[in-house]
Image (cartoon, rainbow, N blue to C red):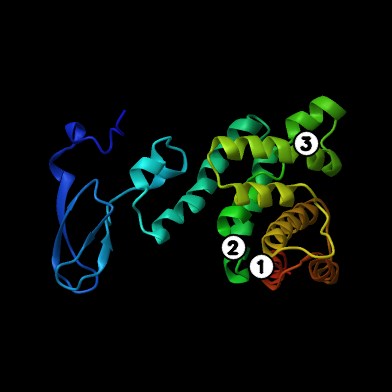
């Protein structure tokens, strides 16, 4: 079977197009299924600007289709993974809107922390989305969804989901390790710290909403709980903005 997007029988009038080389301005003719071509003007390998690689994170034919992509584009497959995980976790949690909202906020703030801290977005965002992935299993087995029970059940469910999405084994291993313990160990990775800080921020936001906390108390909690400077600054910006 050939991917419909690459099968010329399904092509339309815009399947062949011209674009200027971003390096020298020479006009380049691309076919929609060409991932790269070499510019005759400057000799640079130019990436097809209109090619959508979103399917690469889940399509069973991705390896055959994208195998010749340059390394920088193949690396994007890891980043695309987080979007697929976001969809899967919402389907998994179904009508548990409170938990979906919590998880979405954690992922949003993890995304703001990871780049300045030099973490790996694919790992951090996937772990942030999957923090509560063991909720249904914990409820069925233990009758509650305490952190201890989420830690016990979450990694196995997360591994199954990430394997189905064809994530790389090192990504799966680190994501599962991150969600296996809510409390930091003596030595933690940057990726863990980014996820941890994002969840702490959301918890502080929820605590602030439920009870009146003085500025001094909030500042003390931020300084005590946050593991990264980026997380600390983000928390102060959000939590102390109206103080």
Q: Are marks 1 and 2 in contact (CB under 8 Å)?
A: yes
Which quadrant of the figure has residue 141? top right
Dot 3 corresponds to which residue? 153
Which one is in front in this view, the residue at disc 3 or the one at disc 1? 3
Dot 3 lies on which element? helix
- Name the residue: 68% across, 65% down: 190
| Relative horizontal placement of residue 79, taking residue 200 as reference (left or right) | left
x, y (%) of residue 169? 60, 47
- Residue displayed at 29% across by 32% down: 2
Residue at screen point 65% across, 33% down = 93
Dot 2 falls on a residue whose secondary structure is helix
Quadrant containing the N terminus in the rendered view = top left
Residue 112, label in figure:
2
> Left of 186 or right of it: where is 176?
left
Mark 1 — residue? 234
Residue 8 appears in view: yes
| Observer able to see residue 105 | no
Give neighbour class at mark 2: few <14, some 14-19, many 20+ (Cα, 10 Å): some
Circle 3 packing at 10 Å, graded few (<14), some (14-19), many (20+), is many
Foreground label between 1 and 2: 2
Q: Residues within 10 Å of mark 1 (few under 14, many from 20)?
A: some
Camera-nearest residue between 192 and 177:
177
Q: Quadrant of the C terminus?
A: bottom right
What residue do we see at 73% from left, 41% from top? 155
Relative to 150, say whether 227 is above or below.
below
Residue 4 location, quadrant: top left
Q: Upstream in the sequence, badge 1 or badge 2?
A: 2
Whether residue 2 is situated above or below residue 213 in the rendered picture: above
């Amino acid at each position: 079977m050939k991917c419909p997007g690459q099968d010329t029988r399904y092509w339309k009038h815009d399947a062949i197009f011209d674009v200027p080389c971003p390096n020298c301005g020479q006009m380049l003719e691309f076919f929609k299924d060409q991932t790269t071509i070499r510019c005759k003007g400057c000799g640079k390998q130019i990436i097809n600007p209109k090619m959508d690689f979103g399917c690469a994170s889940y399509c069973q034919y991705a390896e055959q289709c994208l195998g010749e992509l340059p390394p920088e584009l193949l690396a994007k497959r890891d980043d695309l993974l987080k979007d697929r995980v976001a969809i899967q976790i919402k389907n998994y949690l179904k009508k548990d809107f409170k938990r979906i909202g919590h998880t979405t906020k954690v992922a949003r703030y993890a995304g703001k922390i990871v780049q300045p801290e030099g973490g790996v977005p694919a790992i951090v965002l996937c772990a942030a989305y999957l923090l509560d992935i063991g909720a249904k299993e914990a409820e069925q087995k233990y009758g509650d969804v305490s952190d201890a029970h989420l830690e016990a059940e979450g990694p196995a469910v997360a591994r199954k989901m990430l394997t189905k999405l064809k994530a790389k084994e090192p990504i799966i291993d680190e994501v599962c390790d991150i969600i296996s313990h809510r409390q930091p160990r003596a030595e933690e990775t940057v990726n863990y710290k980014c996820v941890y800080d994002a969840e702490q921020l959301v918890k502080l936001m929820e605590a602030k909403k439920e009870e009146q906390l003085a500025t001094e108390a909030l500042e003390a909690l931020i300084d005590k709980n946050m593991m990264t400077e980026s997380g600390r600054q983000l928390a102060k910006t959000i939590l102390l903005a109206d103080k």
